Image: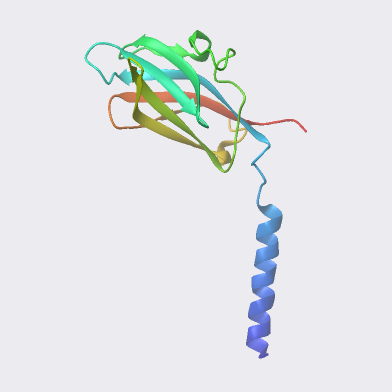
Amino acid sequence: MSRFMRRLLTFALAVGALTTVVAPAHADKLRLDILYIRCNDQSEPFSDEIRLRVNGDIVASWNDVDGGEVHPFYTSHTIARPNGPLDIPFTGDSVIIDILEQDGNEYGLIGWLEVPASLADAGQQEWAASMYDGAYSISFNVWTTPD
């Protein structure tokens, strides 16, 4: 092996080891708390019936949501998670929050928000969701679980 190739290999191994050492292992140490949802512009002419879905579960729901309103998590009418959208585990490098509009027994996806693990312990955030219809933002907190 040439001298150049040995140096290149040594450098590549050192960078790989450094990357391995500093890469955080967030998968089972992070939690997401959804604090509130803000309706900047409703998706229907009257009121929205908003549902938040995370990891396949409906974690929060509100009826009669109109533009300009803020709905805290504790006003949610969710039966599946009686304590509201708190302490949601991360299952990877991010959590996707789907914003659904319920019409009768049907759910329609009207927007979504991806919350990255890199926000761990950065404090309360409020981000605008990527919307197909209407305009919503979600306030949340990503925190590290104590070991």
- Say which of 124 and 23 sits in front: 23
Furthest-front residue in view?
Answer: 105
Hey, which quadrant is residue 64 in on the image? top left
Give coordinates of residue 75: x percent, y percent.
49, 8
Furthest-left residue in view?
Answer: 45
Task: Give the number of callouts.
Answer: 0
**As drawn, is 44 to the left or to the right of 64?**
left
Give coordinates of residue 146: x percent, y percent.
75, 30
Which image quarter holds the C terminus? top right
Image position of 26 with respect to 143: above or below: below
Furthest-right residue in view?
Answer: 147
Furthest-bottom residue in view?
Answer: 2
Hey, which quadrant is residue 68 in on the image? top left
Hey, which quadrant is residue 141 in on the image? top right
The structure's colour scheme is: rainbow
Q: Residue at x 64, y 41 (%)?
A: 27
Q: Residue at x 68, y 53 (%)?
A: 22
Give coordinates of residue 76: x percent, y percent.
49, 11
Image position of 58 with respect to 120: above or below: above
Q: Which residue is drawn at 42% across and 12% down?
A: 62
Image position of 23 with respect to 10: above or below: above
- Say which of 88 and 81 sits in front: 81
**As drawn, is 37 to the left or to the right of 20?**
left
Q: Residue at x 57, y 39 (%)?
A: 117
Which image quarter holds the N terminus? bottom right
